[in-house]
Image (tube, rainbow, N blue to C red):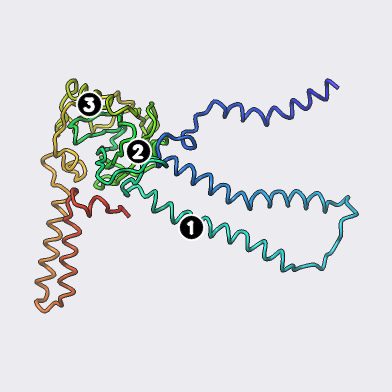
Amino acid sequence: MKNLLDSRKSLLLPLVSPLLLLAGCNLEVMNPSGDIAVQQSHLILVATGLMLLIIVPVIALIILFAWRYRKSNTAAIYTPDWDHSTKLELVIWGAPLLIIIALGLITWISTHVLDPYRPLQRLDANRPIAADTKPLIVQVVALDWKWLFIYPEQGIATVNELVTPVDVPVRFKITASTVMNSFYIPALAGQIYAMPGMVTTLNAVLNKPGQFTGFSANYSGAGFSDMRFKYYGKSTGDFDKWVEVTRTGGGKLDRANYLELEKPSERAPVQRYGSVASDLYDAIVNRCVDMNDKCLNQIMADDAIRTTLKAASVSLKATPATRLFAVAQADICTVPLTSTKANYARPY
């Protein structure tokens, strides 16, 4: 009897061990602290459940058929000439089709509701956001290999430390200094790519105070593994105190200091800046922090003007539609970062 119990324990151990290991994990993706991430976790559960409606029965039927029609089971009915069943065909094709339709509908709705560029409509499932609510703006720059956060309205900046107030909408304006990267805070929202010369947007809100982890989710070189930062959710009062402490105790982040900060470094410590040059983020996006470099928006504007003049000079008999197209090209190339077009433009 004892040997039997020991053998059962040895069989159960491989099954129980992974569960014990997972018990110590903090799965922020499925237990987040921000409303956007909560909705995304629900979407994962719903999509997984719908797919399991097919996967579980198929696996069960495979086991059933293998057992029922095993070679030693002489009682099983043997019908080698059977090749069609209308009822089975309806189930085999109908059930997956209905699930695909349901998944497609859910995906279409969630794609629009959870669009990172879309201003938030609620703080959580029970609290809508007032129409006149102004989000906190945080400008994010992915450096090699650290994160720079600029608070333009507060006039401060930090390196590898992000702080936002709880239950306040936050609008992240994200870019990169050199190579493509990915900004990801599992407890807050999904990942958003950071690309040099471009600005992507993420609207999110944190509903619980605490300390969380953010990191790069896209390989970007030797220091990628340590490209992490601490994210703190604080009450509005504590956030205001943190801003004042940073403002009075930090240094100045101007173009010269940024060029030093931009140099590649690994495991960079937290740094705070009490003042920031007002045009720094725009210069970072347009790749012209160095005063000797020409800004991308100016290069595009010059190209647009040349294109427009060339189109006009080719033929004075150009049709109104052709002239309108040339003007539209110039308008697209010269949209400033502060315009509505730039705020809701997509990088794809």
Q: The residue tagged with tag 2: helix, strand or loop? A: loop
Q: How crowded is mark 3: few (under 14 residues within 10 Å), some or many (20 or more)?
A: some
Q: Which of marks 2 and 3 is nearer the N terminus?
A: 2
In the image, which disc is placed on residue 154? none
**CA–CA distance in space, label 2 to label 3:** 19 Å
* Pointer 2 residue: 205
In the image, which disc is placed on residue 105? 1
**Residue type marked 1:** Leu
Q: Give the residue furthest to the bottom.
A: 317
Which quarter of the figure has residue 211? top left
Q: Which residue is drawn at 84% across and 64% down?
A: 79
Q: Where is residue 262 in the image (x, y as percent from the top left)?
A: 23, 33
Q: Residues within 10 Å of mark 1 (few under 14, many from 20)?
A: few
Q: Which residue is drawn at 71% across and 63% down?
A: 88
In the rendered image, the quadrant that contains the C terminus is bottom left
* Pointer 3 residue: 243
Decide if residue 106 is on the left or right side of residue 133: right
